[in-house]
Amino acid sequence: MTEETVQDVPVEAVPLAPEPTAPAPRRRRTPKQDPLLVADVATARAGVEQIAEPSQIGAGHRVTVEEDRLVVHLFECTLPGYRGWNWFASLARAPRSKAVTVCEVGLLPGEDALLAPEWVPWSARVSPEEKAQEEQDRAEDEAGENAAAGGTGVPGGEPAPGDRAEGGSVPPREGEGS
């Protein structure tokens, strides 16, 4: 009888440690539709009218059930520039209560709403030509500031050593005689 070592055993025969598995996600039941909240369109519309003019709330209306005793009423938005957006009012009620409460109101984008593109930093969207132009503009601005400060490009506005005329006099301007 021969004794097998781990080196002699084919790879398929070596049992692997079981991989840890995540617990199976709990099935979530579908929330029950609350007929009282679904039917209370007037309260939802009154809630939206607190933040919008009645003329800005369109005729389109639908309801989504979020949780038990929590629904969201969506109304079409007629504001210019907000095509595809919806006014919303979330309504809730306590268990065994008939009192409906407006929890939140606002404006949400719909499926066909126009949205701004994702933000991209300036450094990632600028072209090499724009960077070169900006550097050139900056150099010109610095040269203009130096000229206004004293004219020679030497910090502090002092004239450069070769800019003074002999004897401390001012050199003649162009077109003036010497």
Image (cartoon, helix red, strand yellow):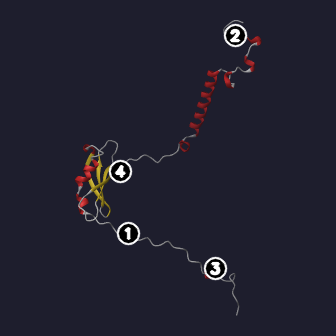
Q: Position of residue 96 (x, y in %)?
A: 25, 65
Between 32 and 103, the residue placed more toward the observer is 103
The earlier-in-sequence mark between 4 and 1 is 1
**Quadrant assignment, res 95:** bottom left
Q: Which mark is residue 11?
A: 3
Which of disc 2 and disc 1 is earlier in sequence? 1
Which SS class for mark 2?
loop
Return the residue at label 1.
28
Q: Position of residue 108 (x, y in %)?
A: 35, 50
**Tag 2: amino acid:** Pro
Foreground mark, 1 or 3, reads: 1
Residue density around tag 1, few if under 14, some if 14–19, many if 20 or more, within 10 Å = few
**Residue shown at 25% from the left, 44% from the top:** 54
In what element is the residue under mark 4? strand
Circle 2 packing at 10 Å, graded few (<14), some (14-19), many (20+), is few
- The residue carrying mark 2 is 172
